[in-house]
């Protein structure tokens, strides 16, 4: 661990499509069973997809991406979007091995919760792979609880994911 380095969480900037692509593909390669999509699927997205995603998620309160940054190095990301019926959904949480154990995931989660709170959402929900104990402990530490809903993980249907919710 390095001294005198601070972890920050910030919203993606409109011009960071290439960084979003790089970080998302790094996440999918590192933790393929943690996401609904696969590395192969997202690798095929054209540059315009990433450019548009960064621009759309950089402002507003209905769709956002946040990065965790360690001394200028993006070591994590999380996305969120607001559903038509009001709640927010936390998606695509990931922290690189080089950034784990330093509070990045908690800070990213809290950033989504705060955005949802500011937007007046009634709550936040997420899906977590059922055997991902570190992620489950993280979400429970922020106040999420299981709501009893489970389904096959879209990218790996032999695995199960469970929904967690947080009322605001």
Image (tube, helix red, strand yellow):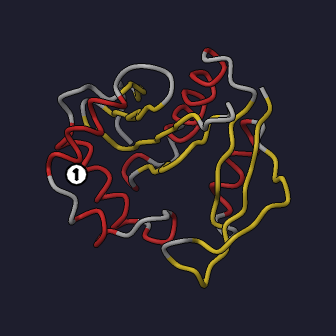
Front-most of residues 34 and 43: 43
Q: Residue under circle 1?
A: 22
**For residue 146, above or below residue 155:** above
Mark 1: few/some/many CA within 10 Å (<14, 14-19, 20+): some
Where is residue 93 drawn, in percent x and y?
50, 48
Where is residue 103 drawn, in percent x and y?
54, 37
| Residue at x 69% of width, y 45% of height | 139
Where is residue 142 drawn, in percent x and y?
72, 36
| Residue at x 64% of width, y 56% of height | 127
Using residue 91 as the reference point, say whether residue 17 is left or right of it: left
Using residue 131 as the reference point, say whether residue 102 is left or right of it: left
Looking at the image, which residue sits at the far bottom? 158
Check disc 1 and report its element: helix, strand or loop: helix
Q: Disc count in the image? A: 1
**For residue 1, above or below residue 168:** below
Looking at the image, which residue sits at the far right? 148
Q: Quadrant of the N terminus?
A: top left
| Residue at x 63% of width, y 28% of height | 113
**For residue 121, above or below residue 104:** above
Using residue 129 as the reference point, say whether residue 93 is left or right of it: left
Q: Quadrant of the C terminus?
A: top right
Where is residue 145 drawn, in percent x and y?
81, 47
């Amino acid at each position: 661990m390095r001294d005198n380095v601070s972890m920050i969480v910030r919203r993606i900037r409109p011009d960071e499509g290439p960084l979003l692509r790089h970080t998302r593909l790094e996440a999918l390669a590192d933790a393929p069973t943690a996401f609904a999509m696969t590395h192969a699927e997202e690798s095929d997205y054209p540059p315009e997809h990433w450019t548009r995603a960064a621009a759309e998620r950089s402002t507003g309160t209905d769709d956002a991406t946040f990065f965790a940054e360690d001394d200028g190095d993006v070591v994590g990301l999380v996305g969120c979007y607001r559903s038509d019926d009001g709640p927010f959904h936390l998606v695509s949480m990931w922290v690189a091995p080089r950034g784990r154990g330093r509070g990045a995931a908690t800070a990213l989660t809290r950033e989504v919760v705060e955005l949802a709170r500011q937007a007046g959402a009634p709550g936040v929900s997420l899906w977590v792979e059922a055997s991902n104990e570190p992620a489950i402990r993280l979400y429970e530490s922020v106040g999420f609880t299981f709501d009893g809903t489970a389904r096959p993980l879209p990218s790996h249907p032999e695995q199960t994911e469970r929904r967690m919710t947080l009322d605001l």
